[in-house]
Image (tube, rainbow, N blue to C red):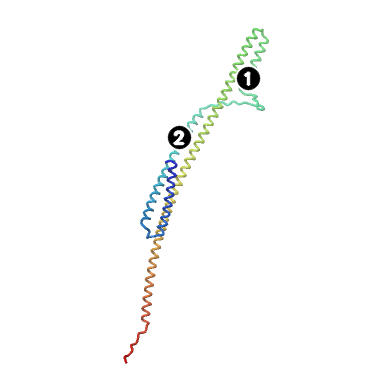
């Protein structure tokens, strides 16, 4: 059930509830003389309201189950990411800086070693004859080139390790954020289910209270009718007694003798 259908059911539910309220007010005004068509329409509307609420509650439960399944999937992905991160080994290399300039690191130590090799080679070359000096310079240049290539490779490896660590941290943060969203969604769905149940209970109690009030009003009306009938009987009896008393108190006429 999509969002449009859910909204349509909510609108129908509101309309039917308003109609039931109006009909119940009319039934309360009629009392025991309420027309049957009003009672039947109230029962039909209540059945339709119960059907709509059942559909909405089923949709909420389905959304809750889907949220739980999504949360379980995120947990499984989170576990796989954690296992992958546990296998990543990042080598930390400290670099000491002075006014923003690196003064010592593994790269600098290798560079210093290379320079020492070059200085020793140049010194030995100066002390040796010219042919031997040329061969030594070539060897020193090759050694310096190898050391430089090793330095470049070390820097690249360090950069790759840092990039791998940052990517792992970013992936872990994304997984944690997704898990939090899934948990929040599941909590919202659970709260919606509870709110729907509470609304159904409240509506049922209101209907029961309204029915009880209608019954009490009918009983009061019957009692009022009985009291009125009893008062009418008592008034009739009192009138008859007064008439009888007046008749007994009236003097009888004396017959006049004939001349």
Which residue occupies the foreground of this view, 193 or 105?
193
Direction left: furthest residue: 258
**Could you tell me which quadrant the N terminus lies in?**
top left
Q: Position of residue 186 (x, y in %)?
A: 47, 40
Residue drawn 45% across the image and 35% down it: 73
For residue 134, what is the image quadrant? Answer: top right
Circles 1, 2 touching at the beta carbon (< 8 Å): no
Q: Percent from the top left, x then y, of residue 227? A: 39, 67
Q: Name the residue under label 1.
A: 111
Question: In the drawing, does residue 251 fall left or right of residue 110?
Answer: left
Mark 2 crowdedness (10 Å alpha carbons): few <14, some 14-19, many ≥20: some
Up-down: is 125 above or below 227?
Answer: above
Q: How many marks?
A: 2
Q: Residues within 10 Å of mark 1 (few under 14, many from 20)?
A: some
Mark 1, secondary structure of its residue? helix
**Quarter of the image that includes the C terminus:** bottom left
Secondary structure category for the residue under label 2: helix
Q: How far apart are marks 1 and 2 (CA)?
A: 51 Å
Compared to 143, does 79 lie above or below? below
Q: Which residue is drawn at 47% across and 32% down?
A: 77
Relative vertical location of residue 91 with respect to residue 255 in this rendering, above or below: above
Quarter-of-image position of residue 102? top right
Counting from the top left corner in percent of width and height, residue 112 is at 64, 19
Query: Which residue of the protein is positioned furthest toward the bottom in this rendering?
Result: 259
Q: Nearer the viewer, residue 171 or 223?
A: 223
Q: Of residues 198 and 12, which is closer to you in this image?
A: 12
Left or right of 162 on screen, residue 121: right
Q: Name the residue: 62% across, 24% down.
A: 105
Q: Position of residue 224 (x, y in %)?
A: 40, 65
Q: N-terminal of the two: label 1 or label 2?
A: 2
Residue holding disc 2: 73
């Amino acid at each position: 059930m999509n969002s449009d259908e859910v909204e349509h059911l909510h609108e129908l539910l509101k309309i039917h509830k308003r109609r039931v309220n109006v009909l119940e007010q009319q039934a309360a005004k009629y009392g025991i003389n309420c027309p049957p068509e009003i009672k039947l329409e109230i029962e039909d509307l209540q059945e339709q309201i119960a059907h709509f609420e059942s559909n909405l509650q089923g949709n909420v439960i389905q959304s809750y189950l889907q949220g739980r399944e999504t949360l379980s999937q995120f947990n499984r992905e989170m576990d796989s990411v954690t296992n992958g991160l546990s296998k990543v080994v990042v080598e930390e290399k400290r670099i000491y800086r002075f006014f923003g300039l690196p003064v010592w690191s593994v790269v600098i130590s290798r560079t210093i070693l290379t320079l020492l090799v070059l200085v020793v080679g140049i010194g030995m070359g100066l002390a040796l004859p010219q042919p031997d000096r040329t061969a030594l310079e070539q060897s020193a240049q090759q050694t310096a080139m190898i050391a430089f290539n090793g330095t470049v490779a070390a820097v690249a490896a360090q950069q790759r390790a840092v990039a791998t660590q940052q990517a792992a941290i970013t992936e872990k943060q994304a997984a944690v954020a997704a898990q939090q969203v899934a948990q929040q969604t599941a909590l919202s769905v659970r709260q919606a289910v509870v709110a729907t149940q509470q609304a159904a209970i409240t509506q049922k109690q209101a209907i029961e209270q309204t029915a009880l009030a209608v019954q009490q009003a009918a009983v009061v009306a019957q009692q009022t009718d009985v009291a009125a009938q009893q008062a009418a009987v008592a008034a009739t009896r009192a009138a008859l007694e007064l008439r009888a008393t007046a008749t007994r108190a009236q003097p009888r006429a004396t017959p006049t003798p004939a001349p």
